[in-house]
Image: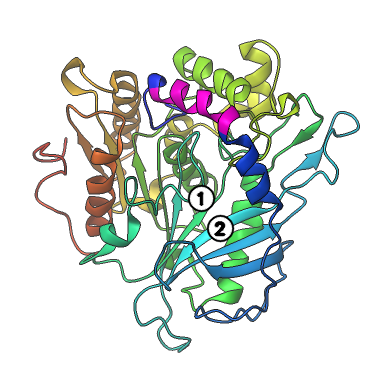
């Protein structure tokens, strides 16, 4: 379950650059947000402050088309004081959600739009799916069967889509699941013309975000009807997965983009068991958060025919551990007679594979089953 969509060497190079760029980042973060009522080609928001979210700004995303907006919020879910006096005051930071509206978006309630919640990977951020050298979502949707709204939320560089049970060294904790499921989802429905039922919602993601998609789909089957997981983490009981998760809580901790990245109080000090418990709680609570257990408990039954897994590592090359873990989840789904699409091949943990996988998933979920898997992998694995 890779916490980074980049190889370790790239991560090391990025971290060496942090000190040089920190000053610019601080200046950027200090810039005042545009007021919520500022002029913008984006549609107005009828309920800007709702579901526990306080909107700070709503404007066209920098460098993007006028159909893509950034909403900036504050919420007590990011962060929650815990364990002692928090080292940051106030104990919350602004978080962004990037929203791509379909061409010709309109308010006509007779024609509501489906919504895809698209989750980023570890050491990623809210911009990951829209950058032209990464997700390039606008291009990925061109000609797609999906004609809806895409919501790309911030989830922290190593948030793991969890309401942390413990706390950072600075005595605060993120509650990403609360932010995404309990606050953002109803906020989107309150402000946009959406299909306000599970039939109109899908969730998908890469790597850490793939784990998040499987987590949310399994824990909230009443909220979603389709799920796609690209190079996803599927089993937090695996020792290699635990080592990676533990390392991520030290390397980037609870940081949100640049915020806290150079602050040790955002990190979690301790051994692997302690760091795992910080993020997920005691091991006896993990089955309710772990995709392979959720599958064994029948939590994906309602997604039959609209669930897809993609992983490289076949033939002993690429993301071999992730490939093995996804194969186990595939078998669990087969054992429970959950019809799903399972595509695997000799792929790497990298964007050139994930873009085609997203397109394949959207075709599968919204148009019809493609005859072949993406990435030249041939037919899906039965």
Of mark 1 and mark 2, the one earlier in the sequence is 2
- Could you classify mark 2 by the number of other residues whose Cα lies within 10 Å: few (under 14), some (14-19), or many (20 or more)? many
Residue 111: image quadrant is bottom left
Q: Where is residue 245 in the image (x, y as percent from the top left)?
A: 54, 23
Observer-nearest residue: 169 or 276? 169
The residue sitting at 45% across, 14% down in the picture is: 240
The residue sitting at 31% across, 44% down in the picture is: 338
Residue 224 among those drawn in magenta: no
Q: Where is residue 41 in the image (x, y as percent from the top left)?
A: 50, 80
**CA separation in Å, label 1 and label 2:** 6 Å
- Could you classify mark 1 by the number of other residues whose Cα lies within 10 Å: few (under 14), some (14-19), or many (20 or more)? many
The residue sitting at 29% across, 50% down in the picture is: 358
Q: Is residue 252 visible?
A: yes
On the image, numbered disc 1 is attached to which residue? 126
On the image, numbered disc 2 is attached to which residue? 97
Q: Where is residue 378 in the image (x, y as percent from the top left)?
A: 8, 38
Query: Which residues make up the magenta segment?
Result: 10-20
Q: How many numbered discs, if any? A: 2
State left or right for residue 345 relative to residue 153: left
Q: What element carries label 2?
A: strand
Check the image and report above or below for 292 versus 250: below
- What colour-coding does the image apply? rainbow
């Amino acid at each position: 379950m890779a916490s980074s969509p980049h190889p370790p060497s790239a991560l090391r190079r990025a971290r060496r650059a942090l000190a040089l760029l920190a000053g610019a980042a601080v200046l950027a973060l200090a810039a005042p947000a545009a007021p919520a009522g500022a002029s913008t080609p984006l549609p107005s928001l009828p309920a800007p402050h709702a579901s526990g979210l306080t909107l700070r700004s709503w404007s066209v995303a920098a460098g993007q088309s006028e159909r893509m907006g950034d909403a900036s919020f504050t919420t007590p879910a990011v962060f929650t004081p815990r364990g002692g006096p928090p080292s940051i005051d106030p104990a919350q930071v602004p978080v962004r959600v990037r929203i791509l509206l379909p061409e010709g978006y309109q308010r006509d309630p007779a024609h509501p739009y489906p919504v895809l919640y698209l989750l980023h990977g570890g050491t990623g951020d809210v911009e990951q799916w829209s950058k032209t050298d990464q997700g390039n979502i606008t291009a990925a949707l061109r000609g797609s069967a999906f004609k809806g709204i895409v919501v790309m939320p911030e989830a922290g560089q190593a948030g793991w889509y969890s309401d942390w049970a413990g706390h950072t060294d600075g005595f605060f904790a993120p509650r990403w699941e609360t932010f995404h499921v309990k606050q953002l989802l109803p906020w989107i429905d309150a402000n946009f013309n959406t299909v306000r039922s599970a039939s109109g919602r899908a969730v998908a993601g890469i790597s850490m975000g793939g784990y998040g998609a499987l987590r949310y789909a399994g824990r909230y089957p009443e909220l979603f009807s389709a799920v796609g997981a690209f190079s996803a983490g599927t089993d937090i009981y695996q020792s290699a997965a635990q080592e990676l998760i533990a390392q991520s809580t030290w390397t980037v901790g609870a940081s949100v983009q640049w915020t806290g990245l150079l602050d040790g109080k955002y990190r979690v000090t301790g051994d692997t068991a302690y760091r795992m418990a910080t993020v997920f709680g005691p091991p006896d609570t993990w089955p309710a958060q772990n995709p392979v257990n959720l599958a064994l408990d029948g939590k994906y039954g309602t997604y039959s025919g609209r669930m897809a897994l993609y992983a490289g590592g076949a033939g002993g090359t690429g993301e071999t551990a992730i490939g093995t873990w996804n194969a186990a989840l595939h078998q669990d789904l087969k054992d429970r007679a959950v019809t799903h699409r399972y595509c695997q091949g000799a792929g790497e943990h990298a964007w050139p594979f994930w873009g085609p996988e997203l397109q394949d998933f959207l075709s599968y979920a919204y148009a019809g089953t493609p005859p072949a898997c993406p990435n030249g992998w041939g037919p899906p694995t039965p």
